Image: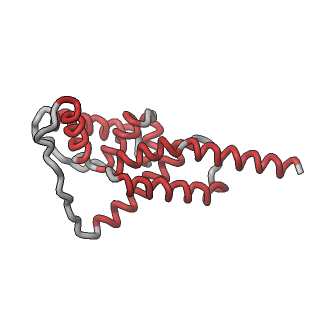
Amino acid sequence: MESQVGAIGAMNEFRDGVEAMIPALRRYARALARDTDIADDLVQDTLVRALRSEKLFLGGDLRSWLYTILTNLNRNRRRALARRPTLMPWTDTGADASGTEAEGGDIARALATLVEEQRAALLLVALEGLSYREVADIQGVPIGTVMSRLARARAHIRASLDGEKPMLRRVK
C-alpha cells in the first residue's frame, strides 16, 4: 500500500513539474517557431509526449528533458517543411514605426535570419536562462559547439542591427 501511495505521489509531482513548465515551453516555442499557432501545437505535442513517456523519465532535470522533446519535435517539423515548397507571407515594412518598436522589429528580423541551431541556442541561453552545458545536452552537441553557435548568432545579430549584411553559415 505504501509503495502505491509513493508512486501516486511521484506521478503527481512529475505532472505538477510538467504543468509548471508550460509558460516557459510556450515562450521558447513561440520564439523558436515565430508563429503562435505552430508554437502552441509544439507545446501541446511536447506535453502529450512527456506525459505518455513519464515512465521513461529517470529523474534528473525535467526542464532540460522537456526542452529536448520540444527541440526535437521542432526539428522534425522543420525537416518535414523542407520537403515542401514554401510560401512567403506578405509583411509590412514598418515604415511608420520608430524608436523601441522599430528596434524590436529589427531584432526580430535578425533573429529570423539566423540558422535554426544558432537561434535555438541563443533563445535557450538568453531567453530561458539555461547554461551552456544544458543547451549542449538539449541539442546533443559538445559545449564548444554551443559556444560557437552563440558567438556566431550574436555576431550575426550585431551585424544585422548595424546594417551590415551578415554572413549566413550553417554550423553543425
Outermost residue on the right side: it is 1
| Residue drawn at the location 27% of the way across and 70% of the way down | 84
**Number of numbered discs on residues:** 0
Residue 10 visible in the displayed image: yes
Q: Nearer the viewer, residue 70 or 57?
A: 70
Q: Which picture quadrant has residue 56?
A: bottom right
Compared with 150, 82 (above or below) is below
* Residue 162, horizontal then vertical, whole percent: 13, 32
* Residue 112, horizontal then vertical, whole percent: 25, 47
* Residue 102, horizontal then vertical, whole percent: 19, 35
Q: Which of 39 and 96 is in front in this view?
A: 96
| Residue drawn at the location 35% of the way across and 45% of the way down | 31
* Residue 63, horizontal then vertical, whole percent: 54, 42
Compared with 81, 57 (above or below) is above
Q: Which picture quadrant has residue 108?
A: top left
| Residue drawn at the location 43% of the way across and 51% of the way down | 71
